[in-house]
Every structure is written in structure tokens, then in C-alpha cells.
Amino acid sequence: MWVVSRQDPMDFDAFKGDIEAAERRVAAEIDPGARALVVAILVFAVLVSLLLPHTGSSRGIDVLIANDTAAADGLSLPSRAFVWLSLVFSIGFSVLALLTRRWTLAWIALAGTAVACPVGMLAVWSRQTAGQGLPGPGIGLIIGWLAVLLLAFHWARVVWSRTALQLAAEEERRRAVAQRQHKTLLEDLGPDAGPTSPNASW
């Protein structure tokens, strides 16, 4: 007769909810490691670019609020869109993602920053092809666009590595559940499912 102990599965089931909750909490977080410092420096660079001239005498702040200085320099919609995307996503959501380490916020920061990349290119192009007498792209616009490009790259690396880890953890969790279910089935069958004694009569 086999001696079957049901204590371990019962103990595991008692804490299964807590374990799964902890796994979900860990899966929802990012661990950028040393890349967090690079992201922080790039966020600071984008912030500084708002204080530098974007074109002529118009700084990024002037473009943001669309004051008279920006209007005098003939700033177009791509410049304003780029500055707002940089402020909201490249700075705002990036800072929130670094502080909270939430994967969702990092994904939002990546998505918004990725959209800001072509918009920034369009903003630079619009200043280069501005009408006669209008200033070209300033140092603030160039620095801001390059910083946004690098920021999108590093956020993509962070989000992608976290996604791969989540998929691996999900696969491991499914494998563990299948093994537990198989073990429970064998225990429910009891000793009758064991091998037949060689002394048994036919």
C-alpha cells in the first residue's frame, strides 16, 4: 500500500492566492538597472531643451505657450506638437515610470516618445524650409529631438526586456500549474493506481 501525504498540496493551495498576487505585482514592474541613469539624463536633456532657443529668439517655453515671441518667429503646428509631446511623454510619463517602476507607465512613455520622434523631424524640417526672413531650427530644437530619439530607443529596450521576462514567467507559471494538477490527479487515484503486486493471483 502506498502512503500518500496530502499536506503539501493543501499547504500550497492555502498560499496560492498570495503567491499569484506577488507574481502579478512583480510582473507589473520594470527593472531598468543602469539604464535608468541614462533615461534620467535624457529626460533632463529634454527638459533643458525647453529653456533653449528652438528657433530665432523663441525658446521651448515660448513655443509651448504660443506667446507673441513664438508668433513673431512664425512657428508652425509641428513645433508646438513636438514640444507638447516631449513635455507630456518624454518628461512627464518618463519621470513617473522611473519613480514608480510601473511597466504600464513605461509603455505609455515609450509610445508617446516614439510618436514625438517623427513629429520632431517634421518640426526641424519645417524650420529649415521656412519662408524668407524666418529663422531656422535652433539649438534647443536639435538637442530636444536627438534626446527624444535616444529616449525612445532606451525605453524600447526596457519595455521589450520586461515583456520577454513576463512571457517567460507566464510560461513557467502554466507549467507549474500543469504539474500540480497532474500530481493531484495521481494522489486522487490513490494506491489502487499503483503497480500490481507480483504475488497477486490470476
Image (cartoon, helix red, strand yellow):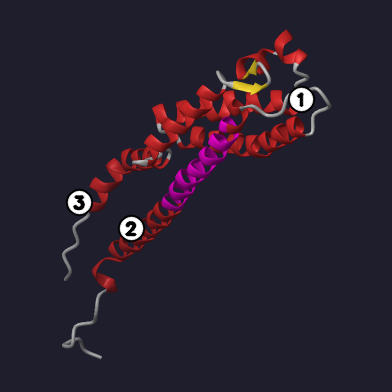
Please tell me whether the stretch drawn in magenta is mainly helix, strand or loop: helix
The residue shown at (32%, 59%) is 184
Residue at the far bottom: name it: 202
Q: Which residue is mark 2?
A: 180
Label 3 sits on what residue type?
Gln
Camera-side residue: 116 or 194? 116
The residue shown at (56%, 37%) is 146
88 versus 109 height, above or below: above
Camera-side residue: 127 or 147? 127
Residue at the far front: name it: 133
From which residue to which does the magenta span run?
Answer: 143-166
Q: Which residue is mark 1?
A: 77
Q: Nearer the viewer, mark 1 or mark 2?
A: 1
Q: Which residue is mark 3?
A: 7
Quadrant in which residue 180 is drawn: bottom left
The answer for how far apart the CA atoms under marks 3 and 1 are is: 68 Å
Q: Which mark is residue 153?
A: none
Pointer 2: residues within 10 angstroms few (<14), some, or many (20+)? Answer: few
The answer for how far apart the CA atoms under marks 1 and 2 are is: 59 Å
Q: Is residue 134 left or right of residue 180?
A: right
The residue shown at (71%, 11%) is 69
Pointer 1: residues within 10 angstroms few (<14), some, or many (20+)? Answer: few
Q: Nearer the viewer, mark 3 or mark 1?
A: 1
Q: Position of residue 7 (x, y in %)?
A: 20, 51
Tell me if label 1 and label 2 are in contact, CB under 8 Å.
no
The answer for how far apart the CA atoms under marks 2 and 3 are is: 13 Å
Label 2 sits on what residue type?
Arg
